[in-house]
Image (cartoon, rainbow, N blue to C red):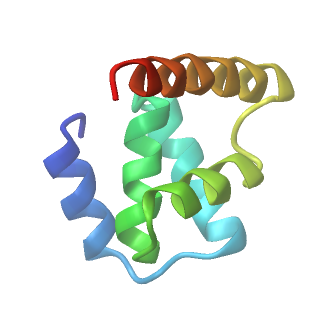
Amino acid sequence: MKTVGEIKKYAESLPMLDGRALAGGLVRLKNGGVPFLGCVCFVQHNRKVGLLEARNILLAADVYSEREKSDIEAMLQVMFAEVNENA
């Protein structure tokens, strides 16, 4: 399961996950090679929330180390800066 379509379909096939169940599912996805944005997609479609809320839920879950979270935040800031430059 690597494509956005596959992740979306899988997320929507499950009941809405919370807490440990959500974290466990996300760890399985991450360990299976699904990148951060794929995990955001999973949360967004499973929980039926917006992109920013899905990102925040994912970062609050016990899935990524503090170092990984820091690297993710740095990458996102670069992306946001590029979007703002091109707006």
Quick check: 53 left or right of 61?
left
Above/below status of 27 relative to 44? above
The image quadrant of residue 2 is: top left
Quick check: 16 left or right of 62?
left
The location of residue 74, given as percent across then percent down, is: 68, 18
Instruction: Tell me what residue is drawn at x 72 percent, y 22 percent.
Output: 68
The location of residue 83, given as percent across then percent down, is: 40, 26
Residue farthest bottom in this picture: 15
Quick check: 69 left or right of 52?
right
Comparing 45 with 50, the one in front is 50
Instruction: Tell me what residue is drawn at x 44 percent, y 66 percent.
Output: 50
Instruction: Tell me what residue is drawn at x 43 percent, y 29 percent.
Output: 35
Comparing 23 with 79, the one in front is 79
The location of residue 53, given as percent across then percent down, is: 57, 63
Above/below status of 81 relative to 16? above
Above/below status of 51 relative to 80? below
- Count of labels shown? 0
Q: Considering the image in quadrants, where does the N terminus appear?
A: top left
Above/below status of 50 relative to 76? below
